[in-house]
Structures are given as C-alpha cells and as structure tokens.
Image (spheres, rainbow, N blue to C red):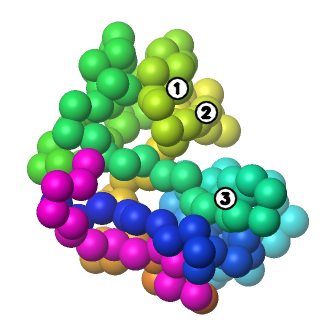
Amino acid sequence: MKRIYVNEKWCLGCHLCEYYCAFANSGQDDMVKALKNVTIHPRIQIEQRGNISFAVSCRHCEEPLCVKSCISGALTRENGVISINPDKCVGCYTCILSCPYGAVMPSESGAIQKCELCTKNAGGEPACVKGCPNKAIVFEERQGAE
C-alpha cells in the first residue's frame, strides 16, 4: 500500500505541507479565501528538533492502536487507510493517547482529525506531497515498511 514517507534531510521546515493539507480539507476552491486570516488545523505537522525538520502524519499502521482503542467505532481501517467518521467520535481522545507517532489530534469541532491520504477530498496524490517544494514528502509503496 502507498503511504506518506518523509526524508528529513530534504525538509526545509517551510510548513507548506501544512497549508496544502489545511486547504485540501477546507472544502473550498480558493486557497487565499480558505486560509487568509485563519488559524489552520492541518492533519500533518512539522516538528523541529535542533536543525532537523520533519513532517508527522498518520502512518496507516497494519495493526493500528488508534482503531483498537476507539470506543465508539469512529476509526476504521479499510483498504489500508485509517479513516475517521466524525459523527461517531465522542471526543474521548483515547486514540490520541494510543497513537505512538502523535499523528491523531483534536479538530476544531471537538472530534479528532488525522491524515486520510486525501481520500475524501483531493484523490490521487495527497496535497502535502504535491505541495512540498523540495520533494521531502513522498507517496510511495515500500517493501517491508509499516
């Protein structure tokens, strides 16, 4: 299955992936109108440790602890993609606590949000991958990787 991978050697820490993610999930057609004067809530986050920058997003694990811990059934795994049904989320945040990668986060609505590989909005290649100017984020299939 294709997943998002990050090469931290190439990451500039520019945060463009966060903006492309927020726009892709905004439901709007104009990036300026969607994001101008708005606090964004992307499903991918840039972390910085010293002079190293890297993007953190859902890894769509084979054995997802977030799905196993979800008491309401809001998180499901289908065709390798872990998706959220926000209408089922009760906001207990057990999934946030159980994710070893820190890839699940609260949304503005009180439910949770996480990367769904742009399956519900952009289709094809995830928006963060398309928008990365240095190609530090890739969407590819790798042997033996989870």
Q: Specify the principal SS of the magenta part.
A: loop
Label 1 element class: helix
What segment carries the magenta color?
A: 134-146
Q: Quadrant of residue 63?
A: top left
Question: Which residue type carries mark 3?
Answer: Ile
- Residue type of the residue flagged with mark 2: Pro
Disc 2 designates what residue? 106
Q: Position of residue 47 (x, y in %)?
A: 69, 54
Q: Residue at x 72, y 71 (%)?
A: 13
Disc 2 secondary structure class? strand
In the rendered image, which residue does mark 1 sit on? 96
- Which secondary structure lies at badge 3? strand
| Placement of 125 over or under 74, stated as above or below | below
Q: Amino acid at mark 1?
A: Ile
Compared with 141, 84 (above or below) is: above
User: Which of pointers 2 and 3 indicates the residue nearer the eye?
Assistant: 3
Q: Quadrant of residue 4?
A: bottom left
Where residue 82 sits in the image (x, y, percent)? 29, 42
Residue visible at 15% across and 63% down in the picture: 143
Q: Are marks 2 and 1 in contact (CB under 8 Å)?
A: yes
Instruction: Please determine whether, in this image, residue 26 is positioned above or below residue 14.
Output: above
Q: Is residue 46 visible?
A: yes
What distance separates the C-alpha of mark 2 from that of mark 1?
A: 8 Å
Name the foreground residue: 73 vs 130. 130
The answer to whether the residues at label 1 and label 3 have Cβ atoms under 8 Å apart is: no
Residue denoted by label 3: 46
Specify the label residue 72 is tagged with: none
